[in-house]
Image: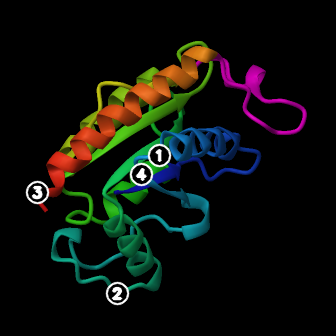
C-alpha cells in the first residue's frame, strides 16, 4: 500500500515540512505502507485553470497531468495541514479541486497544526471536502497545538508522546481502510 504524506502549506517560512518529515518517519517505522512524501509547493499549481470539469479527466496542462498522476498513484493519504482563518490553506483546497476520480475510494488521515486549537477547525472543514471527493477521512487524527513552540533551533519538530501515539493509532486505522477500499477501485 502506497501512502502519500502531503505537505499542504506552500507559503515561504512554513513549518509543515518539519511536521511532515516527522510523520513520514513514524509511518516508515510503522512498516505497513510504502511512504511517499509529497509537497504541494513542488507542483506549483496555479489557481484551477483546466477548461474541462475534472470528472472528465481531460487535462490540458502538464501541471495537472503531473498532479493527477501523483494523486492516482496513492492508496491512502495523510494531509499535513495548518489552519488558516479557521480553515484549510487555499493551496490544499485548490489541489483537491484539480482532480476528482483520482481521489475516489481512498482513505485519508489528517495531521493538523496551529495555535491553541491545533488546527482542529481546519481539519473539520477539510473532512467535508474530502467526503465530496469520495475520500474516507479517518476519525483518528493528530492535532498539534502551538506548533511553533515545538520546532527546534535545528528546524526539527519535537513531538510529545501523545503526538506519536496518535500517529500510530491513525496509521493502524488508515491501513485497515486502505485495504478495504482497494476492493472498490
Q: Position of residue 119 (x, y in %)?
A: 51, 25
Q: Dot 2: few (<14), some (14–19), or many (≥20) neighbours within 10 Å? A: few
Q: Which numbered mark, 2 or 4, is in the foreground of this view?
A: 4
Q: Is residue 156 above or below residue 75?
A: above
Q: Position of residue 113 (x, y in %)?
A: 57, 28
Q: Main secondary structure of the magenta part?
A: loop
Q: Which numbered mark, 3 or 2, is in the foreground of this view?
A: 3
Q: Residues under labels 1 and 4: Cα distance?
A: 6 Å
The residue closer to the viewer here, 14 or 27, is 27
Q: Quadrant of the N terminus?
A: bottom left
Residue 69 in which image quadrant: bottom left
Question: Outermost residue toward the left?
Answer: 184
Question: Mark 4 sits on what residue?
Answer: 33
Q: Sequence order check: which comes first, mark 4 or mark 3?
A: 4
Q: Are marks 2 and 4 in contact (CB under 8 Å)?
A: no
Tag of residue 60: 2
User: Does the stretch in magenta take in 168?
Assistant: no
Q: Residue at x 70, y 40 (%)?
A: 15
Q: Secondary structure at mark 4?
A: loop
Question: Mark 3 sits on what residue?
Answer: 183
Q: Secondary structure at mark 1?
A: loop
Tag of residue 138: none
Q: Is residue 49 visible?
A: no
Q: Sequence order check: which comes first, mark 2 or mark 4?
A: 4
Question: Mark 1 sits on what residue?
Answer: 31
Q: Secondary structure at mark 3?
A: loop
Q: Residues under labels 3 and 2: Cα distance?
A: 30 Å
Q: Residue at x 47, y 46 (%)?
A: 31
Which residues make up the magenta segment?
144-160
Amino acid at each position: 500500500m502506497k501512502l502519500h504524506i502531503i505537505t499542504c502549506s506552500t507559503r515561504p517560512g512554513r513549518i509543515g515540512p518539519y511536521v511532515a518529515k516527522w510523520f513520514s518517519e513514524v509511518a516508515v517505522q510503522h512498516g505497513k505502507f510504502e511512504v511517499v512524501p509529497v509537497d504541494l509547493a513542488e507542483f506549483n499549481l496555479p489557481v484551477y485553470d483546466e477548461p474541462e470539469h475534472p470528472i472528465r479527466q481531460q487535462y490540458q496542462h502538464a501541471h495537472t497531468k503531473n498532479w493527477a498522476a501523483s494523486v492516482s498513484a496513492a492508496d491512502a493519504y495523510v494531509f499535513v495541514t495548518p489552519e488558516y482563518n479557521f480553515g484549510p490553506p487555499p493551496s490544499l483546497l485548490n489541489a483537491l479541486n484539480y482532480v476528482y476520480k483520482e481521489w475516489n475510494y481512498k482513505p485519508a488521515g489528517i495531521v493538523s497544526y496551529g495555535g491553541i486549537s491545533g488546527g482542529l477547525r481546519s481539519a473539520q472543514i477539510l473532512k467535508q471536502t474530502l467526503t465530496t471527493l469520495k475520500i474516507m477521512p479517518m476519525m483518528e487524527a493528530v492535532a498539534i497545538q502551538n506548533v511553533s513552540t515545538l520546532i527546534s533551533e535545528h528546524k526539527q519538530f519535537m513531538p510529545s508522546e501523545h503526538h506519536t501515539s496518535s500517529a500510530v493509532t491513525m496509521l493502524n486505522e488508515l491501513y485497515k481502510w486502505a485495504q478495504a477500499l482497494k476492493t472498490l477501485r
